[in-house]
Amino acid sequence: MREFSVPAMVEVPDSANLTDAPFTRAAEEPGTIVLRRPGAGAWSAVTAAEFAAEVTGVAKGMMAAGVEPGDRVALLSRTRYEWTVIDYAIWAAGAVAVPIYETSSGEQIEWIAGDSGAKAVFAETAAHVAAVEEVRGALPDLVHVWGIDAGGLDEVVRLGRDVPDDAAAERRAARGAADVATLIYTSGTTGRPKGCEISHGNLVRTARNAIQGAISEVTVEGSSTLLFLPLAHVFARLIEVACVEGGIVLGHSDVPNLLPDLATFRPTFLLAVPRVFEKVYNGAEQKAAAEGKSKIFKAASDTAIAYSRTLESGRPGLGLKIRHRVFDVLVYRKLRAAVGGRVRYAVSGGAALGERLGHFFRGVGITILEGYGLTETTAPVSVNRPTAIRIGTVGRPIPGVDVQIAEDGEVLVRGINVLRGYWNNDAATKESLEDGWFHTGDLGSLDPDGFLRITGRKKEILVTAAGKNVAPAPLEDRLRAHPLVSQCLVVGDGRKFISALVTLDQEALGPWKDRHGKPATMTVEDLRRDPDLTAEIDAAVAAANRSVSNAEAIKKYTVLGVDFTEEAGHMTPSLKVRRNVVMKDFADEIDALYAG
């Protein structure tokens, strides 16, 4: 059993809550720019005083509408400026914020709003409002539904015009570090989502220790970030809070508008899940191929990776330095320009990044700081930092967090970030929390100097008929790194050998067909049996197999005619594969792999 602890760098009093930072800044530095919101072709600056005033107006309206301290208020929306205003207004009103993914089905909305006992819901679009209204009959606690696009915020502000300022200030100050700030429901890869009770203290302490102790080199004066991941997810939520706590200028975007927004907002750092970085790399590779520059891009990629690797073992030699400078002009600058030109760091979480991508981006000039965490740990458990980075690991614990590896290899976490418990679910709380240690369900190891490595999921370990334990995650991560592969699922529990289900990336298929002289009319169904494409997937599987023993290697695979999607129930909103759903829906395809 190995353990590594990092003491907290920032102490937070028990009286602290999430509204302290924005209102203190508004009083002391009213003109400081804290956010930028998208406008007509430009970004409008929002000062500390303006943000506090907006938050107060919405908080007063909720108070007038009967929202009491501890009441739950749900928020169903994509990532946008208004989300942050509403989040802080809910906390200023003493209430508990309950985020719901914008893509949630009626059944999911009903479960989260019903289980949390939400008194009010802020819903973004007319369709979102309609989805809530459809299930309203099953939500006896729900009193108000406010449509954001329909002017709901203005309506709420009008409701609170007569609420005295001192009453709002008193309500805002009444919550402390131990009080629940938000119920974040897990994505639910198995079973019903569980509501994680995240306190004011969890968010404030984790954010302040992360800013000042874990990524202090990233969050320097003048830092800014453009948030495009779903704010319903704990990762984006913690960054939202960290920006407000640390005075980092925050902007909001979404994937459809991301590239033009990056060009105009020009952030200094980003956060994303590994799939985003894979898409950036694959897109650049495909663009180079379409322009007849495949050899140049491959040489540039190999040089970036080699350059990054030498940073860990020493200094680049003169020849490598010269090649790196040449490719900086030809390739790397264009990649940096695509994300606004000022990004030096990116924080990656949610899944394993892969060493090759980590080295590539560092060689390009954008250092990806891979981290690890869960909803139950208020996002970060550990993270690499610019001065202490080991690519292939998820870094050391953040200050205030202890990590222990149990006898069976499970990662246990204790500290400032661990949830209070699961809402309305004592059984799950007792199962996951023991003597202050949260049982993550992930398998891992600790290097002697505290760098954490995640090797798989405890419940997803496959045991072949021969008794061999196989962790599917490393194989899946390597296969997904191939440009043509969108998703994959390694199977073989109780079977004679390991197999895989593979899906194709629709965006990558068009350029691939052009390069290989395939008719543009060829469908995924046609391509999944194409010998040229099969040869590429064969090579990808062979490359993944080189990372494991023969007993753990993928012996057979099948390319599916459809991708795994959130709409079909195969993916969570945070882009994790729902293994049980995929196994059920593609049972025939799996059986066919083992037939005969």
Image (cartoon, rainbow, N blue to C red):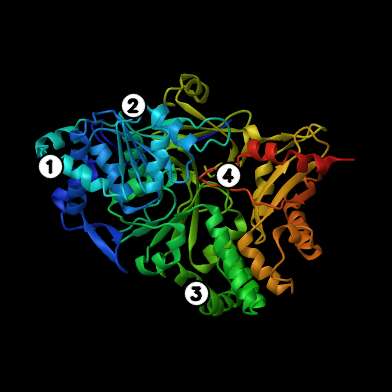
Q: Which mark is residue 543?
A: none
Distance between the alpha carbons at the discs numbered 4 and 1: 43 Å
User: Given the current orientation, which residue lies at the most extreme right position?
Assistant: 596
176 vs 148, nearest the viewer: 148
- Disc 2 marks which residue? 141
Q: Which mark is residue 161?
A: 1
Up-down relation of residue 368 to residue 424 (above or below): below
In primary-sequence order, the first of circles 2 and 4 is 2
In primary-sequence order, the first of circles 1 and 2 is 2
550 vs 74, nearest the viewer: 74
**Residue under the point 48% across and 30% down:** 194
Q: Quadrant of the C terminus?
A: top right
Query: Of the residues shown, which amino acid type is indicated by label 1?
Result: Arg
Query: For the residue carrying disc 4, how many other residues have a C-alpha within 10 Å: few (<14), some (14-19), or many (20+)?
Result: many
Image-quadrant location for residue 120: top left
Secondary structure of residue under mark 4? loop
In primary-sequence order, the first of circles 3 and 1 is 1
- Disc 4 marks which residue? 571
- Disc 3 marks which residue? 334
Distance between the alpha carbons at the discs numbered 3 and 1: 51 Å
Up-down relation of residue 29 to residue 309 (above or below): above
